Amino acid sequence: DQQVKQNSPSLSVQEGRISILNCDYTNSMFDYFLWYKKYPAEGPTFLISISSIKDKNEDGRFTVFLNKSAKHLSLHIVPSQPGDSAVYFCAVYPGAGSYQLTFGKGTKLSVIP
Amino acid sequence: DADVTQTPRNRITKTGKRIMLECSQTKGHDRMYWYRQDPGLGLRLIYYSFDVKDINKGEISDGYSVSRQAQAKFSLSLESAIPNQTALYFCATSDVGQGATGELFFGEGSRLTVL
């Protein structure tokens, strides 16, 4: 059973508009939620995270929202830029004592100039 | 220089051959990981290591082995490569210290093709 689901394999957005990437998870005990960004021929890089005790975290154009009752995580990018075109993975971390992140399958974002 | 370095970056090999992918890091992290990425399947954990004496299987360890030669070095071996091991492989490290959020630092990847 997938613990982390990204149900949209791809998303296309016009430059300047908002990109919303979604992620659902199954375990209410997860402690941290992270977003990674991956360009072709590069390793994933950390983008933004949120603790389970918060419902929003903002970093420049990137905002992550956490809805614990719905077990739903979303990443908002405003305004979207062509350089944001990449694959975005959400990941969950159970917290101290755990050994790994569990990743979703990724969503490929294309920002059209 | 990259904090997490993988070699080789690309490798083509034949079925049945033994292959080793190497990873070294300068971040000083104790935890190291090997992940595999396949199209549409995301990142899946093969093996992880908390320190030189601690090696653990991940969700897809069959057909792979690892060696943690030092805190900074973690290698992945395919004893007898098969075509469905064709994938992009990533090494990663993480900080086990207090306040750590599970953030991983990835290498640039090793693309392996098994013919």
Image (cartoon, coloured by chain):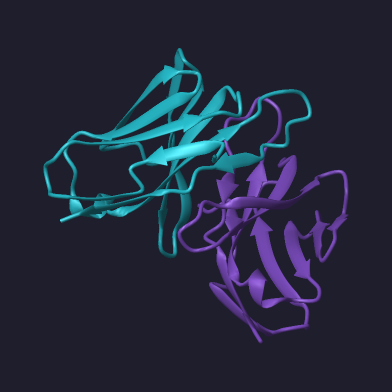
Chain colours: A purple, B cyan
User: Residue B12: x, y in percent?
Assistant: 21, 52
- In the image, A10 versus A2, the foreground residue is A10
Q: Is B22 drawn above or below residue B68 in the view shown?
A: below
User: Residue A52: x, y in percent?
Assistant: 81, 45
- In the image, B85 versus A46, the foreground residue is A46
The answer to which image quadrant residue A69 occupies is bottom right
- Tell me what residue is drawn at x 16 percent, y 38 percent: B80
Q: Is B16 drawn above or below residue A36 in the view shown?
A: above
Q: How many marks?
A: 0
User: Residue B56: x, y in percent?
Assistant: 44, 25
Q: Judge left or right: residue A106 versus residue A63.
A: left
Q: Is A112 drawn above or below residue B41 in the view shown?
A: below
- Tell me what residue is drawn at x 62 percent, y 30 percent: A98
- Tell me what residue is drawn at x 45 percent, y 59 percent: A41
- In the image, B96 versus B3, the foreground residue is B3
Q: Judge left or right: residue A52 versus residue B106.
A: right
- Tell me what residue is drawn at x 20 percent, y 34 percent: B79
The answer to which image quadrant residue A111 occupies is bottom right
State the residue lying farthest toward the top: B53
